[in-house]
Structure formats: C-alpha cells, structure tokens
Amino acid sequence: MRLLIGTLFTLVIAAIVGLGATYLALSHDTSFGAMTIGRWTAYPKTGTTDIDPYARALLARTGRLPIALGDGVAFIARTDDKGRPLDGRCNVMLSGVTPAARFWTLTLYAVNGELAPNSVHRHGFTSQEIVRRADGSFSVVVAPRAQPGNWLPTGGIERYILALRFYDTSVGVATKEGREVPMPAIATRSCP
Amino acid sequence: MIRWLLLLLGGVLLGGIVHLATIFILPRTATQDAYSRLTPIAPVNKVVPLPEPTPEKAMMPFMDPAFAEAVCRYDLTQGPLKLSVPLSTAYTSVSFYTNEDVAYYAINDRAAGRGAIVLDLMTPEQHSEMPENENITAADRLIVESPSLTGLIAIRALAPEPGLMPAAQHAVAAARCKKTEEAKASN
C-alpha cells in the first residue's frame, strides 16, 4: 500500500511538473537565440533549419508560419520603453530610425495575433507610406482616436503587440546588438 | 519524511523528462499548425491565393497585412516540381517550409532575373539522379533541395500602399507550381 501511494505521488508530481513546465514555456514565448534591442525582440533562428525545439513547439501550437531568414526578420514589442504593457486606450509614440532594409512594415496585432478591428481599416504602415522628417527619422502615434501625422489606430483594445518586420535586410543571426541596428523608441504619452 | 522528499525529487526528475518529451512530440502531433490549417484549402502541387487577413478571419495568426500571399502545398513523391513566380512591382519573396513548418530556404526578387523567379524543387535523391548532361545545361537553373517529401511554398508580394494590393494579389495568383514533366509538356 505504501509503495502504491508512493508511486502515485511520484507520478502525480511528474505530471504536474512536466506538463506545467511545457504550458509555461509555450505561454511565455520561450525560445532560445532571442535578439533584443530596446523593447523589441526577434528570433532570427526561428526562420532557419537551426530552429530550437521550443520555438518549433510554439509554432505548432500557435499555427503561425515564421518569416524565413532569407526573406526578412520580425521584431515584436509588447511593452513601452518603461516596461509598461502597450495599452490601446493610451496614446503611444513610436519615434526614431530603423536598421537598413529594402522595405519594412509595422503592424498592430491583438495579443493572440489577430488584427485589431478599427473604423478606418488600417492595421499598419509600410516604409513607403510613412511621412518622415528631413533627417529621415519618423514618428508614429498609436492611439484610439485620430491624430495628425502617422496615426496607427488601436480600436481601443486593452492590450496589443507591435510587429516591425524588415525585408531584404542584413539584420540576422550574426547581427550584434547596438549601433548598427537602431530601433524606434516606444513611449506612452497620455492615458485616459 | 526523507522517503517523501526522495519521492518528490524522483517526481521532479521524471517531470523534467515528461516536459522535454512533450516539447519534442508536440510539432509531430499538432493539428492546428500552419501546414494542417492550409491542408483543407490547398490542393497538392497547385498555387492557391490566400484571402487577405482581416480582424474577423485570417488563415494564420501574425500574417502581414501589407502582403498578398499564395501557397503551394507540394508533394515530390511523383517527381520534381517547377515553380515560377512573376515579380510584382515592389518586393516579391518565395519561402520554403517542410511539412512541420520549418523554414529551410527563401529567395527574393533581387536574386531573380528576367521578370520572374523560376526554380526547380526536388529531393536530394532526385537531384543526384538527374542525368549528367542535363545537370550541365542546368547550370544556370536554380535548384532547391527539399529535406522533406511534402511541404509548403509561400509566395509573398508586398503592396507598399493599399492601392497597390490588387496588383500584388494578381502577381502571386499568376505563380505556377507544377511537376517538371508537365511544365515541359506545356512549353
């Protein structure tokens, strides 16, 4: 009887620890080889055959197709520069320059990867659509209500994710973080 | 007391094995991964344009709405495949994935010539079986080796502004993926 209870106890612990760890790893986007610049994170290796098992499990679970490294690289931001989660009811300012690439796109997603509904059907910008300052830098206001300049509507959702994708770029696995990959700053300006 | 601590330790160690096993098995058993999602709408060896992602409906999460996209779900058991993609005005790329969604190759319009990306997709075995003389005349041909017999080709064209989306959609819809023999016969 003691043996039976002991075995059951061990198996229950194993199930809780094992499945719990898997659940946590997959719900927190845990992959190796992250490249983080400011609040922007990319996983260039996920777009190659060197993809790690955690990233593969994550792809299988979410159903997304990674950008192949020869095509481009995708950076994701979930918080502003102060670590505050991106809130669709606030005005958030994106400003600065981007690393060299033939094209880039900026897209706003709900946390689950769906596009956020809004009245003007705008979900992002491409590098050709953006209005820049004389020095080549730009700023985008991510806000629930219309703003002058480059306005990216949030539709008022509570949490969102920004994706900045660079196409035909030298940014990749061998890129060193720092001056050669300048990423736009993210600042929350005002909240209701 | 010590007995229970040992059992707990044993449980945690066993849990580690369970964790690793589930992480490795998951991609093999997934039913909601990109390849499985596209299987019902994409017949084998045929280019199928994907509907534009909208907030209500998208084939996959995190699709880039600035791109027109088409897929060809391929099967090389019957022989190599010939892929041709006409270039759109801005940026066109072709990415190759195995049936487990691992990206193994990608090419963009910069590497293509004469207004189209044209390449042959085959397994390493089919590549080595290619006749010698054909291999020489094929020196200027682009050959991609697929590590798996089945997989996905994603064809993407950028619409730099929304007004150019119809042109980009037109370009990806005009892409062709066919068995090499059939492509030869129709030429």
Image (cartoon, coloured by chain):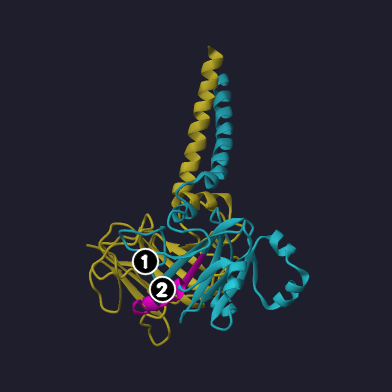
Chain colours: A yellow, B cyan
The residue positioned farthest toward the bottom in the image shown: A134
Circle 1/circle 2 CB separation < 8 Å: yes
Answer few, some or many: residues within 10 Å of disc 2's Cα (few below 14, many 20 plus, some between 14 and 19). many
- State the predominant SS element of the stretch in magenta: helix
Who comes first in sequence, dot 1 or dot 2? 1
Closer to the camera in the image, A80 or B46: B46
Residue A133 is labelled as: none
Q: Is residue A152 left or right of residue A83?
A: left
> Percent position (x, y) of residue B17?
59, 36
Mark 1 closeness class: few <14, some 14–19, many ≥20 residues within 10 Å: some
| Percent position of residue A106, x then y | 40, 70
| Residue A109 placement: quadrant | bottom left
Dot 1: element: loop
- Residue A69 in the image, given as x and y percentages of width and height: 56, 66
> Residue at point 29% right, 65% down?
A154
The extreme right residue here reads: B132
Report the magenta residues as a range. Answer: B154-173
Q: Which secondary structure lies at badge 2? A: helix
Which residue is labeled 2 in the image? B169
The total number of labels drawn is 2
Disc number at residue B52? 1
Q: Is residue B168 magenta?
A: yes
Q: Does mark 2 fall on the same chain as mark 1?
A: yes
CA–CA distance in space, label 1 to label 2: 9 Å
